[in-house]
Every structure is written in structure tokens, then in C-alpha cells.
């Protein structure tokens, strides 16, 4: 059986719509309040480890959006990325996480596609974040 799953944009949007938060309060409750659990998954699950840096950026981007520090990204992108993180937290999704070898393949595939689709917004945020970090050092 293949260790790789392909998702197209339509399938991604379908899955995201199931998990995407409707407002900022839901993002706080379902994503920001789960930082420790998300950190644990991305730092220990082999299929998710390659996304560690992207996860940290996305989590920070969502947090800065919700706190009002960064509002350049459309809410639909923030909700979609938050939905993907909620999907990763869900033990029961397209492939149940407890299935050996395959449990997190769908999570990684959906996350990878979401990062690809939101790449411009993520990069724009990274550039903004660099300017903030430099200003804080002054």
C-alpha cells in the first residue's frame, strides 16, 4: 500500500469545510487553546515532523490574526488553515490516526496541500514577522 495520498483542491476544501471554524472565538477555542497538543503532534509524529516550521508559522499567523496584530490575510485563509490544524487534532478523519503507518498520512497530505494553496499569504506573513522581529531587537 502506498505511503502517499494525493488530495486535490476540491477534496481539501470539502475536508476543510467540515473542520473550519466559523469565527475568531471558535479559532481560539479549537486551535489556540490546543497549542500544547498541536506542538506535541508536530514534534513527535513522523509524518508531521517535516511540517514543524510551517506549523509554527501558521500557528503564529493565526494567533496574530485573532489578536489583531496581523489582519492582512483574508479570514477565509485563516479559517482554512485553522481547519487543517483542527483536522490534524481529530483522531477520526479520512484515515483514523491510530492505524499503523497510515494514520497520519492524510493529515500530512491535507496539510501539505493547504500550505501550497496558502503559500503567498504564508510568505507575506513571514516577511511581516521578520520586520516585527527586527524592530523588537532595536
Image: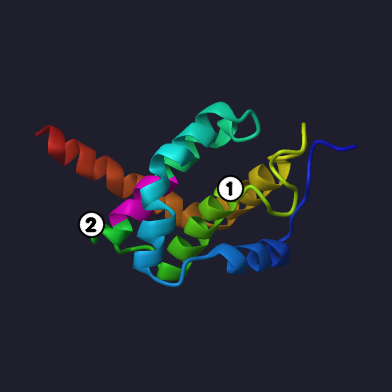
Q: Residue 7, percent across and down?
A: 74, 55
Where does label 1 land, which residue?
88
Residue 109: give x, y in percent of width and height: 68, 46
Instruction: Name the quadrant of the N terminus.
Output: top right
Identify the residue at horizontal 72%, vertical 40% (top origin).
Answer: 103
Q: Residues within 10 Å of mark 1 (few under 14, many from 20)?
A: many
Residue 113 higher or lower than 102, as above or below: below
Quarter-of-image position of residue 10? bottom right
In the rendered image, which quarter contains the C terminus? top left
Spot occupied by residue 59 in the image (x, y as percentages of width and height): 40, 47
Residue 113 seen in render: yes
Magenta residues (range) = 58-64
- Asked if residue 94 lies left or right of residue 87, the reply is right
The residue located at (30%, 64%) in the rendering is 71
* Foreground: disc 1 or disc 2: 1
In this orientation, which residue lies closer to the viewer: 134 or 62? 62
Whichever of labels 1 and 2 marks the residue nearer the N terminus, that label is 2
Q: Which residue is mark 2?
A: 69
Amino acid at each position: 500500500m502506498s505511503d502517499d495520498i494525493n488530495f486535490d483542491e476540491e477534496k481539501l476544501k470539502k475536508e476543510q469545510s467540515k473542520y473550519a471554524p466559523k469565527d475568531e472565538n471558535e479559532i481560539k477555542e479549537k486551535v489556540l487553546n490546543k497549542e500544547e497538543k498541536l506542538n506535541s503532534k508536530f514534534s513527535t509524529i513522523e509524518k508531521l515532523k517535516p511540517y514543524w516550521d510551517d506549523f509554527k508559522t501558521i500557528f503564529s499567523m493565526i494567533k496574530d490574526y485573532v489578536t489583531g496584530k496581523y489582519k492582512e490575510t483574508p479570514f477565509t485563509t485563516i479559517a482554512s488553515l485553522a481547519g487543517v490544524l483542527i483536522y490534524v487534532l481529530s483522531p477520526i478523519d479520512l484515515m483514523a490516526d491510530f492505524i499503523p503507518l497510515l494514520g497520519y498520512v492524510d493529515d500530512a497530505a491535507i496539510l501539505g496541500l493547504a500550505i501550497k494553496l496558502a503559500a503567498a499569504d504564508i510568505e507575506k506573513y513571514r516577511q511581516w514577522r521578520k520586520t516585527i522581529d527586527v524592530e523588537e531587537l532595536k
